[in-house]
Image: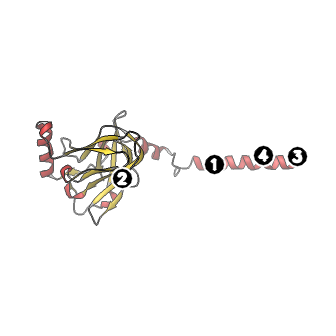
Amino acid sequence: MKAKRITLVGLLIITLGIIAFIGCSNDSPTSPVNQSINQGIPGDQINWIQWKPEVANKIKAILDGPRTLAKVGYQEKMIYKKEGGTVGGDATFGCKVTVPPYAFREKNRTIIVRVATSEEANAGVDFLPNQTFSKNVKITVSFEYLNINANADLTELNIYWLDDDTGLWVLVPNPEIDLENGAISVYIDHFTRYQWGL
């Protein structure tokens, strides 16, 4: 009986040693490199994609003009819990969000898609209001409105979200690149600003 206990204790120690060894590996999901990507990186370390010049000019004119009159670059829609729905599309330069049924508790929510740009014409979109969902929602952006070099490797295109608390940009994992339809999509559980980079 004593020998069995010693063997079990030995196996437990070996198992814990293996777990500790794997946990310290550089390829581990908890390695410092992967943690920094998950926790965010400064915006100046990302090669941002810009809007095409004509799109950037339209967006800047909208942002500088009276907000209530903006019919381009902005779409607002009531989404019902039982049905879900899509907001955005052509009016928001190919930016849209698709909310599945039962993604939130309330009977309905107003969802807003508003395109955004920086002084450098970086392509971005605000999904509003800032909120969290109980199921992932799908955000999609069309390549048609982005100023992407013809030689760029579109499989390297990524979407980042802005962490308002830290001011850092967090990579959204597993983007779906649809080369046939010229779009990139990701699944997210909350709204904030999203931008595209290589």
The residue identified by callout 2 is 186
Label ID, residue 122: none
Left or right side of 38 for 44: left
Label ID, residue 19: 1
Residues at discs 3 and 2 in contact (Cβ within 8 Å): no
Distance from Cα at disc 4 to Cα at disc 2 = 46 Å
Q: Is the residue marked by circle 4 packed among few (<14), some (14-19), or many (20+) residues within 10 Å?
A: few
Left or right side of 17 for 98: left
Foreground disc of the pair 3, 2:
2
What residue is rendered at 63% in x and 46% in y? 20
Disc 3 on helix, strand or loop?
Answer: helix
Q: Amino acid at mark 1?
A: Ile
Between discs 4 and 3, the one toward the N terminus: 3
| Residue at the farthest bottom position | 180
Q: From the viewer's side, name the closer residue of 129 and 52.
A: 129
Between discs 4 and 2, the one toward the N terminus: 4
Q: What percent of the width, then of the height, locates residue 27?
A: 52, 52
Placement of 169 over or under 198, stated as above or below: above
Distance from Cα at disc 1 to Cα at disc 4 = 15 Å
Label ID, residue 2: 3
Confirm whether residue 182 shows in the render: yes
Distance from Cα at disc 1 to Cα at disc 2 = 32 Å
Q: Amino acid at mark 2?
A: Val
Q: What percent of the width, then of the height, locates residue 58?
A: 12, 47
Distance from Cα at disc 4 to Cα at disc 3 = 11 Å
Disc 2 on helix, strand or loop?
Answer: strand
Q: Amino acid at mark 4?
A: Val
Confirm whether residue 192 shows in the render: no
Q: Residue 144 lies in what quarter of the image? A: bottom left
